[in-house]
């Protein structure tokens, strides 16, 4: 079946360093990808998205890279701050149009 | 713009009891979604409404779960009878139309079945 997975369940980084969170997806028909941030006790919050006709998109301190050849997605956070500590999910729209979430990576920022 | 409102925030029930969750989407949002998020996992879609009609309920365990969206605004999700494995956070989300962008989640209801 369709699945979206993340490579690492937990990522620990030092404050000020850059963070890279990875995601592998399995549905080559997916055409839209989103990264969400989820803090404890809250719902997922939109961070950045990318369409399949792009390979890179930048936001404020965040960059998403898409490699369709190997079906890989990554989220880069520059100058990671304590407020970035959360669980990060990648999600895709597969050929059904439904939003499918991966398992999540917990980002821990050490002061 | 007010966000997606959900209540209650927390609920503890015994197995075989029934429970209901309520969601008020963002004003003007035609599409409403209910997701189940088990601890440590990503959200999984249970049901999608477009106005007051069901678009997709293929992942909804219909023997015990039901949902409705009367008048195309508020929605309720019910579980009867609850099982231990239903312990999860139930998230409601809404969007202006069926497009994925513009999707906003509520804070969810954390259900514990004991």
Image: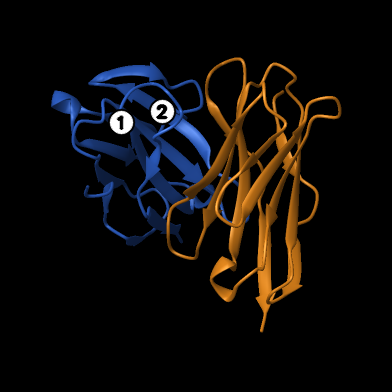
How did the renderer colour the structure? by chain
Query: Which chain does the numbered disc 2 sit on?
Result: B
In the image, what residue occupies the spot 31% across and 38% down? B77
In three-dimensional space, the C-alpha distance between marks 1 and 2, rounded to whole angstroms, equals: 8 Å
**Identity of the residue furthest to the right in this view:** A70
Q: Is residue A3 left or right of residue B107?
A: right
Q: Is residue B41 left or right of residue B8?
A: right
Asked if residue B93 is positioned above or below residue A29 in the image, the reply reads below
Q: Residue B106: give x, y in percent of width and height.
A: 35, 49
Tell me the tag on residue A42. Answer: none
- Dot 1 crowding, Cα within 10 Å, few <14, some 14–19, many 20+: many
Q: Element type at marker 1?
A: strand
Q: Quadrant of residue A73?
A: top right
Using the rendered image of the protein, determine whether residue A37 is visible from the camera's viewpoint: yes
Q: Colour of chain A?
A: orange
- Dot 2 crowding, Cα within 10 Å, few <14, some 14–19, many 20+: many
Using the rendered image of the protein, determine whether residue B81 is visible from the camera's viewpoint: no
Q: Are marks 1 and 2 in contact (CB under 8 Å)?
A: yes
Q: Nearer the viewer, mark 1 or mark 2?
A: 2
The residue lying toward the viewer, choosing from A50 and B17, is: A50
The residue at which mark 1 appears reads as: B67
Q: Residue B20: give x, y in percent of width and height.
A: 28, 45
- Choose the circle earlier in sequence order: 1 or 2: 2
The residue lying toward the viewer, choosing from A96 and B96, is: B96
In the image, what residue occupies the spot 38% across and 33% down? B33
**Identity of the residue furthest to the left in this view:** B71
Query: Which chain does the numbered disc 1 sit on?
Result: B
Asked if residue B67 is positioned above or below residue A109 in the image, the reply reads above
Q: Element type at marker 2?
A: strand
Q: Which chain is blue?
A: B
The residue at which mark 2 appears reads as: B47
């Amino acid at each position: 079946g369709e699945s979206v997975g993340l490579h690492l369940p937990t990522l620990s980084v030092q404050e000020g360093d850059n963070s890279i969170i990875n995601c592998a997806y399995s549905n080559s028909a997916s055409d839209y990808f989103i990264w969400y941030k989820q803090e404890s006790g809250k719902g997922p919050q939109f961070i950045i998205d990318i369409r399949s006709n792009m390979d890179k998109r930048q936001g404020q301190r965040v960059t998403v890279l898409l490699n369709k050849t190997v079906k890989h997605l990554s989220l880069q956070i520059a100058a990671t701050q304590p407020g970035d500590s959360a669980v990060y999910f990648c999600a895709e729209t597969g050929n059904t149009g439904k939003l499918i979430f991966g398992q999540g990576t917990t980002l821990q920022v050490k002061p | 713009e007010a966000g997606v409102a959900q209540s209650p925030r927390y609920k503890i029930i015994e197995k075989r009891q029934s429970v209901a969750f309520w969601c008020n989407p963002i004003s003007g949002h035609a599409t409403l979604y209910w997701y189940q998020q088990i601890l440590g996992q990503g959200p999984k879609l249970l049901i999608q409404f477009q106005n007051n009609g069901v678009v997709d309920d293929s992942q909804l365990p219909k023997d015990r779960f039901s949902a409705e969206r009367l008048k195309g605004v508020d929605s309720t999700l019910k579980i009867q009878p609850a099982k231990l494995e239903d312990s999860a956070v139930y998230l409601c989300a809404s969007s202006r139309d069926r497009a994925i962008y513009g999707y906003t989640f509520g804070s969810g209801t954390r259900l514990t079945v004991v």
